[in-house]
Image (tube, helix red, strand yellow):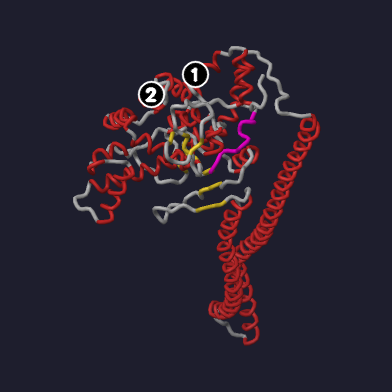
């Protein structure tokens, strides 16, 4: 083999030596293949891949073991910090639970004594009646014997009983009222303090999870409590950290498929070591978890615009603010001559299944050079913007792959491309036809209209359909963001 070649070039040259037809076909179509994909195809053709390219004795025997040990130390530090944080949370929870249990214990004892006191009060009339009959007879006999005359037994008894009853009732009332007032104030104070403890717990949770930046989204109504958006900045996150984050926030695709709700977790970039995941299933699920909230968020933004457009067009009078908004949307969707009908046709969602399938195809499930270096999920071309130069490109072509600052910008540009470019007019017409028939905008129905997206044409659309079916991407089409305003897809 030639010297001074990159590892990827050596793999391509190895494929040419052994006449690997699959790789040659990809090169003829000028398709970008990652090193992982090249290695996979070579292994599939039972070709031994030499592992001593660009390696030395020092790298193999010293540098790699040391780097491996350092990674293990870093992982150990992360695990220990997580365990310490978890233990501290358990301690605080134990303190709060113990304080609540102690207060509940004394409160229950007090209630028990109160019930006993009420029982005593219920017995007092019977005791009073017994004392009444006893003392009335006793004093009546005494007065009869002393004065040798007969007193009215009923009147004497009533007078004595009234004295004893007044004394007993007055003492019981004053003591009982003061005690129960104190208890009611204590119960009210406890009931007021309980919600404050819960709020503090909920506010502390986001700060314990990998120092995420939490931004509260704007709410449409005061009654609606939005789930905080988790925006993860450019931190060069490792895949292991991302997977731990998903586990901490209980982000599970099976749960999303069942509940049709996804949390607003927005990554600004893919993990650089995503390709190192050995399990193909886990790699695909991680990719879908990262891209899905971005796609759903953009679709919901478009649905909000459709709702506002329908509201404006249904009224006879429009304000200056509404007219300014319409002018802005005409520019955004590149609608000429101010045609509202054409704006309605273009201002519509892209099915989630199509967006996920195209993102997976164009970015190699988030592992391509364009996706990792430029956040280019959909492989959009540019001739005058900032872009990444393809390695294998025809000299007659001067295009580049458009670079984006964050992943969400790539998703927004992709949806704007499908909704405005003349190459996808069939896609928009088919989508409008489904709307007019009161049918849902279906991904599998619309994939056939995207032959212009790639040079392979119909073969490209077949691959998209295959990706959608094999990975059950149709399950994600009704998914919406947690606690978002649910809008019906109106037939505008």
Residue 424: % across, % down:
34, 30
Circle on res. 309: none
The answer to whether the residue labelled 2 contacts the one labelled 1, judged by CB atoms less than 8 Å apart, is no
Residue 274: % across, % down:
61, 34
117 or 238: nearer the viewer: 238
Callout 2: few (<14), some (14-19), or many (20+) C-alpha neighbours within 10 Å? Answer: some
Residue drawn where x is 76% and y is 34% of the image: 64
Q: Quadrant of the C terminus?
A: top left
Mark 2: secondary structure: helix
Q: Which residues are magenta?
A: 268-277
Residue topped by disc 2: 451
141 or 115: nearer the viewer: 115
Callout 1: few (<14), some (14-19), or many (20+) C-alpha neighbours within 10 Å? Answer: few
Rendered image quadrant of residue 352? top left
Q: Quadrant of the N terminus?
A: top right
* Residue situated furthest left in the rendering: 316
125 or 174: nearer the viewer: 174
Residue topped by disc 1: 28
User: Magenta includes 273?
Assistant: yes
Mark 1: secondary structure: helix
Q: Nearer the viewer, mark 2 or mark 1?
A: 1
Side (left or right) of 491 relative to 256: left
Rendered image quadrant of residue 479? top left
Q: Is residue 174 above or below residue 361?
A: below
């Amino acid at each position: 083999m030639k010297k001074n070649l990159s590892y990827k070039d050596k793999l391509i040259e190895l494929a040419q030596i052994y006449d690997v037809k699959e790789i040659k076909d990809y090169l003829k179509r000028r398709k970008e293949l990652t090193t992982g994909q090249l290695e996979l195809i070579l292994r599939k053709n039972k070709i031994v891949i030499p592992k001593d390219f660009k390696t030395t004795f020092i790298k193999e025997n010293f540098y790699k073991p040391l780097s491996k040990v350092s990674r293990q130390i870093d992982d150990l530090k992360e695990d220990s910090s997580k365990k310490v944080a978890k233990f501290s949370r358990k301690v605080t929870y134990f303190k709060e639970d113990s304080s609540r249990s102690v207060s509940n214990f004394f409160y229950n004892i007090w209630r028990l004594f109160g019930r006993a006191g009420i029982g005593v009060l219920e017995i007092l009339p019977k005791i009073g009646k017994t004392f009444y009959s006893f003392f009335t007879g006793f004093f009546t006999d005494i007065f009869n014997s002393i004065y040798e005359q007969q007193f009215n037994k009923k009147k004497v008894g009533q007078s004595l009983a009234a004295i004893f009853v007044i004394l007993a009732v007055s003492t019981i009332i004053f003591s009982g009222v003061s005690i129960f007032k104190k208890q009611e104030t204590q119960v009210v104070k406890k009931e007021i303090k309980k919600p404050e403890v819960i709020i503090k717990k909920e506010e502390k949770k986001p700060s314990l999870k990998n120092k995420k930046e939490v931004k509260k989204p704007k709410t449409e109504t005061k009654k609606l409590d939005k789930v905080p958006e988790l925006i993860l900045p450019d931190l060069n996150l490792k895949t292991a950290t991302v997977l731990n984050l998903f586990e901490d926030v209980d982000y599970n695709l099976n749960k999303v498929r069942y509940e049709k709700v996804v949390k607003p977790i927005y990554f600004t970039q893919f993990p650089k070591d995503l390709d190192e995941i050995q399990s193909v299933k886990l790699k695909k699920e991680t990719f879908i978890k990262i891209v899905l909230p971005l796609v759903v968020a953009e679709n919901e933004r478009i649905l909000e615009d459709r709702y506002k457009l329908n509201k404006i067009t249904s009224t006879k009078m429009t304000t200056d603010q509404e007219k300014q908004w319409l002018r802005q949307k005409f520019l955004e969707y590149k609608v000429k001559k101010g045609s509202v009908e054409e704006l309605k046709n273009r201002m519509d969602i892209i099915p989630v299944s199509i967006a996920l399938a195209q993102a997976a195809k164009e970015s190699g499930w988030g592992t391509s050079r364009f996706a990792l270096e430029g956040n280019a999920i959909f492989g959009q071309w540019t001739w005058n913007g900032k872009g990444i130069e393809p390695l294998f490109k025809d000299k007659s072509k001067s295009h580049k792959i458009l670079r984006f600052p964050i992943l969400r910008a790539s998703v927004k540009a992709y949806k704007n491309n499908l909704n405005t470019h003349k190459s996808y007019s069939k896609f928009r017409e088919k989508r409008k036809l489904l709307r007019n028939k009161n049918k849902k905008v279906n991904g599998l129905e619309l994939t056939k209209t995207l032959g212009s997206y790639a040079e392979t044409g119909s073969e490209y659309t077949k691959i998209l359909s295959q990706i959608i079916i094999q990975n059950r991407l149709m399950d994600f089409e009704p998914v919406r963001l947690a606690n978002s305003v649910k809008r019906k897809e109106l037939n505008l």
